[in-house]
């Protein structure tokens, strides 16, 4: 297993760093563009949710992003120590929401917000959320298609 | 946010020059689109050809602008690709917005 971990300040302007990391790792691992895009989107949505909702956009807090990779899966973990996700939103992660069940012709009902969790649920294969010792963890797993390995990874914590 | 604006007849083409439309800039993005409409533009092409990433906040800004435009005009998308196109599909927004492969096709459709 290979592991990459970064932390960013709870500032929406810093979220691009998460994109850079996730996209870079996915491309280095030889994932196709669709998989890379999905994982990047999920990472950004999850981190943005932490900053907006767990920290209420307060600066000076920390959001950690960890990528763990094995041959058949990529696990993305986003952690914060802010306000935990409400039960209603946790249920969205398992049962889904109808936020994208709209009639495209019914403009008034097209969502302008509240899409992030459902995007994650649809794009990822396994999702769980936990709060342990004041740390909230959103765990997202994507099972990967078979591919040829692309060189040796430089990683900070092989196991 | 940086935009390049080109007028082709009655159509305003607003090319987003920034590579990302995410939560940090979504309010400014939404304000700029509102400004276009306040200025009287009723046929607008948002050219996303230089945008490599959009999140749900950016999409929300586009949806809000589409609602503001309502039936009084057209707001369409051109040149979405890669992660941006994936995001439109994941959220079914590709069914909500009229989307064109390139700017010329979008302008032709609105002219």
Image (spheres, grey):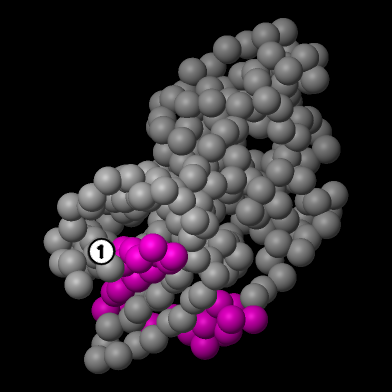
Tell me: A107 left or right of A151.
right
| Identity of the residue drawn at 34% across and 64% down | A69
Q: Nearer the viewer, residue B70 or A51?
A: A51
Q: On screen, A57 above or below A152?
A: below
The quarter in which the N terminus of chain A is drawn is bottom left
Q: On screen, B78 above or below B85?
A: above
| Identity of the residue drawn at 45% across and 70% down | A141
For this orientation, the residue located farthest to the top is B9
Instruction: Give the total of numbered labels.
Output: 1
Tell me: A145 left or right of A148.
right
Q: Nearer the viewer, residue A62 or A3?
A: A3
Tell me where residue B20 appears, x and y as whole percent.
42, 38
The quarter in which the C terminus of chain A is drawn is bottom left
Tell me where residue B87 appears, x and y as whole percent.
58, 48
**Chain where mark 1 sits:** A
Tell me where residue A64 appears, x and y as whole percent.
25, 67
Magenta-span inclusion, residue A89: yes
| Identity of the residue drawn at 23% across and 50% down | A152
Question: Label 1, on which residue?
Answer: A2
| Identity of the residue drawn at 50% across and 43% down | A33
Asked if one can make out residue A90 in the rendered structure from this viewpoint, the answer is yes
Tell me: A55 left or right of B97.
left
Graded by Cα atoms within 10 Å as few (under 14), some (14 to 19) or many (20 or more), the crowding at tag 1 reads some
Tell me: A92 left or right of A5.
right
Tell me where residue A83 appears, x and y as whole percent.
35, 81
The quarter holding residue B35 reads: top right
- The segment highlighted magenta reads A67-95
């Amino acid at each position: 297993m290979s592991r990459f971990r970064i932390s960013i300040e709870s500032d929406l302007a810093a979220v691009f760093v998460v994109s850079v990391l996730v996209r870079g790792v996915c491309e280095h691992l030889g994932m196709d563009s669709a998989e890379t895009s999905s994982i990047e989107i999920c990472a950004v949505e999850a981190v943005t949710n932490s900053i907006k909702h767990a920290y209420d956009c307060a600066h000076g807090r920390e959001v950690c992003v960890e990528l763990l990779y094995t041959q058949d899966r990529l696990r993305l973990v986003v952690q914060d120590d802010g306000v935990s996700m409400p039960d209603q939103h946790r249920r969205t992660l398992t049962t889904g929401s109808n936020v994208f069940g709209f009639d495209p012709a019914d403009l008034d009902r097209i969502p302008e917000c509240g899409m992030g969790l459902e995007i994650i649920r649809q794009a990822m294969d396994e999702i769980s959320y936990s709060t342990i010792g004041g740390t909230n963890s959103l765990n997202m797993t994507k099972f990967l298609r078979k591919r040829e390995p692309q060189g040796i990874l430089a990683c900070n914590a092989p196991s | 946010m940086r935009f390049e604006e080109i007028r082709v007849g009655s159509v305003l083409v607003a090319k987003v020059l920034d590579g990302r439309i995410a939560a940090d800039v979504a309010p400014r993005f939404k304000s700029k689109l509102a400004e276009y409409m306040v200025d009287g533009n009723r046929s607008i092409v948002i050219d996303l050809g230089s945008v490599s990433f959009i999140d749900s906040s950016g999409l929300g800004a586009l949806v809000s602008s589409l609602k503001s435009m309502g039936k009084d005009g057209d707001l369409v998308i051109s040149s979405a690709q890669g992660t941006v196109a994936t995001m439109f599909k994941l959220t079914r927004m590709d069914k909500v917005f009229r989307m064109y492969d390139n700017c010329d096709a979008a302008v032709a459709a609105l002219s």
